[in-house]
Image (cartoon, rainbow, N blue to C red):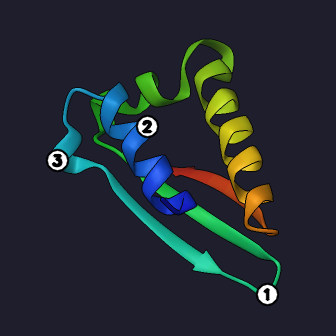
Amino acid sequence: MNTKELIEYIAKALVDHPDQVKVSEIEGEKTSVIELSVAKEDLGKVIGKQGRTAGAIRVILGAASANFGKRSVLEIIE
């Protein structure tokens, strides 16, 4: 499972409308940017109180991307 699939799996588990979860990846030489887009009413569930859920997802992403020898950044698109 790559990092894009991991973020998609986590996001679909959190939201009420998993069919509207879209994940895209922009790969660079050493860094990749993963953009996560969810339904407007699910945005709060992905971000969480004071950004804790989003922070936890970023920690998981950082650990997973370290296994691939890359750095990954998560951007949540409104």
Q: Which residue is mark 1?
A: 29
Q: SS of the residue at dot 2?
A: helix
Contact? badges 3 and 2 (CB < 8 Å): no
User: Residue at 69% across / 72% down in the picture?
Assistant: 32
Q: Residue furthest top?
A: 49
Amino acid type of disc 3?
Asp
Relative depth, front residue between 5 and 21: 5
Q: Which residue is mark 3?
A: 19
Count of numbered labels shown in the rendering: 3
Q: Earlier in the sequence, mark 1 or mark 2?
A: 2
How far across and how far down the image is residue 66, in percent? 80, 57
**Can residue 38 be spotted in the picture?**
yes
Q: Residues within 10 Å of mark 3 (few under 14, many from 20)?
A: few
**Can residue 78 be spotted in the picture?**
no
How far across and how far down the image is residue 9, in percent? 38, 44
Q: Earlier in the sequence, mark 3 or mark 2?
A: 2
Q: Nearer the viewer, mark 3 or mark 1?
A: 1
Q: Which residue is mark 2?
A: 10
Q: Residues within 10 Å of mark 1 (few under 14, many from 20)?
A: few
Relative depth, front residue between 72 and 16: 72
How far across and how far down the image is residue 22, in percent? 33, 58
Q: For residue 50, what is the image quadrant?
A: top right
Q: SS of the residue at dot 3?
A: helix
Compared across the picture, whether 39 is left or right of 32 comes to left
Compared across the picture, whether 70 is left or right of 77 comes to right
Amino acid type of disc 1?
Glu
Relative depth, front residue between 15 and 59: 59
Amino acid type of disc 2?
Ile
Q: Earlier in the sequence, mark 3 or mark 1?
A: 3
- Tell me the distance, in whole angstroms, between the alpha carbons under discs 3 and 1: 31 Å
